[in-house]
Image (cartoon, rainbow, N blue to C red):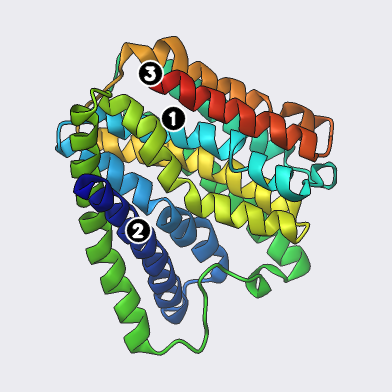
């Protein structure tokens, strides 16, 4: 029981520390004169992925690479099937009003690149450089497009940035930064250590723990965001959140982790889990390309598919 409680504690610390780091970094950057446009594309994006990154790096250092890779693959599958399925089940998502085709196809391309590198059997430093180069190209193009939009409409600087508070005092900015920088490695260490103990105690592989318990836990912020977006009828926020998160998971997290050390690929990933992740991504195609609404019926289907996937892993 204590191991489960410590695992939950590690997850809570990780999520709270990630949120604190985003708030502190965003407000520090804005006070130093960094444009809101750049903050939104870089600081917020990397900050919200910090928990997953720290888990993967910590797992690799702790000799549990299955957790590192399972965290990313499992999170991407959960992001589509569960994180979009639950809000669709609760209120439906008017995805017919969204135009996310370009970012969606970029996500699919990132998925294919990731799977191709996985079939080499191991993510090495050069694999990491390829993934990070792809991420840099995507961010660069997004920045150019966003700046062009700002120059045309003069609206980008007025857009709200997650975690921004113009009235936040310096001591509070510093406090958030310290909490984030201390809490992230602490939470990751507690979570990985105890999740590994659970895997060994119950005879479950570290890979499965990464694909289920840890992946689901690190997807909770995205789930909360999409549920609120669904209730507010902001389908573009829900869909954009999932697509952006999946791209960062594939390109940034494993890209950086592979620079820390080699990440071997369990053959089971190549036989099953990577294809489930790709199939889940392709399941969005009718809603993105043909502009269908994600109704409650579709929500039931996506959520049921995720539950079936988890059951298949645990059996």
Question: Is residue 93 positioned above or below 251 on the image?
Answer: below
Q: Which residue is mark 3?
A: 118
Residue 182 position, x and y percent, is 22, 65
> What's the mark number on residue 105?
none
Quadrant assignment, res 13: bottom left
| Residues at discs 3 and 2 in contact (Cβ within 8 Å) | no
Residue 275 position, x and y percent, is 51, 16
Q: Which comes before the other along the chain, label 2 or label 1?
A: 2
Residue 48 position, x and y percent, is 44, 55
Left or right, 129 with reference to 162: left
Q: Which comes before the other along the chain, label 1 or label 3?
A: 1
Left or right, 300 with reference to 191: right
Name the residue rendered at 39%, 22% in the picture: 314
> What's the mark number on residue 73?
1
Mark whose residue sits in front, 3 or 2: 2
Mark 1 and mark 3: Cα distance apart in space: 11 Å
226 vs 287, nearest the viewer:
226
Mark 3 and mark 2: Cα distance apart in space: 30 Å
Left or right, 202 with reference to 227: left
17 vs 91, nearest the viewer:
91
Q: Which residue is mark 2?
A: 12
Q: Which comes before the other along the chain, label 3 or label 2?
A: 2
239 vs 253, nearest the viewer:
239
Per the image, label 2 sits on a secondary structure element best described as helix
Mark 2 and mark 1: Cα distance apart in space: 21 Å
Q: Neighbour class for label 2 at 10 Å: few (<14), some, many (≥20)?
A: some
Residue 95 position, x and y percent, is 79, 43
Question: Is residue 308 positioned above or below 210 on the image?
Answer: above
């Amino acid at each position: 029981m204590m191991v489960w409680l410590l695992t939950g504690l590690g997850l809570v610390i990780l999520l709270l520390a990630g949120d604190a780091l985003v708030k502190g970094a965003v407000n520090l950057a804005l006070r130093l004169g960094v444009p809101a446009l750049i903050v939104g594309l870089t600081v917020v994006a990397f900050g919200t992925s910090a928990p997953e990154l720290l888990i993967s790096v910590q797992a690799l250092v702790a000799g549990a690479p299955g957790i590192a890779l399972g965290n990313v693959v499992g999170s991407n599958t959960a992001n589509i099937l569960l994180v979009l399925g639950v809000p669709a089940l609760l209120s439906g998502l008017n995805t017919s009003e969204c135009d996310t085709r370009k970012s969606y196809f970029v996500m699919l391309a990132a998925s294919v690149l990731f799977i191709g590198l996985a079939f080499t059997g191991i993510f090495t430093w050069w694999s990491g450089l390829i993934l990070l180069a792809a991420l840099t190209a995507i961010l660069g193009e997004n920045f150019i497009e966003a700046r062009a939009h700002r120059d045309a409409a003069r609206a980008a600087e007025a857009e709200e940035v997650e975690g921004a508070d113009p009235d936040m005092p310096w001591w509070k900015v510093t406090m958030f930064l310290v909490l984030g920088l201390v809490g992230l490695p602490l939470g990751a260490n507690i979570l990985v250590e105890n999740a590994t103990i659970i895997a060994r105690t119950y005879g479950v592989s570290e890979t499965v723990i990464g694909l289920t318990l840890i992946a689901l836990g690190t997807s909770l912020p995205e789930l909360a965001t999409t549920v609120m977006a669904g209730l507010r009828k902001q389908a573009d926020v829900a869909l954009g959140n999932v697509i952006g998160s999946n791209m960062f998971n594939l390109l940034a997290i494993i890209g950086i982790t592979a620079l820390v050390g080699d990440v071997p690929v369990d053959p089971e990933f190549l036989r099953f889990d990577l294809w489930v992740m790709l199939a889940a991504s392709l399941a969005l195609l009718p809603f993105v390309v043909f502009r269908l609404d994600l109704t409650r019926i579709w929500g039931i289907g996506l959520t049921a598919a995720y539950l079936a996937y988890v059951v298949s892993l645990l059996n």
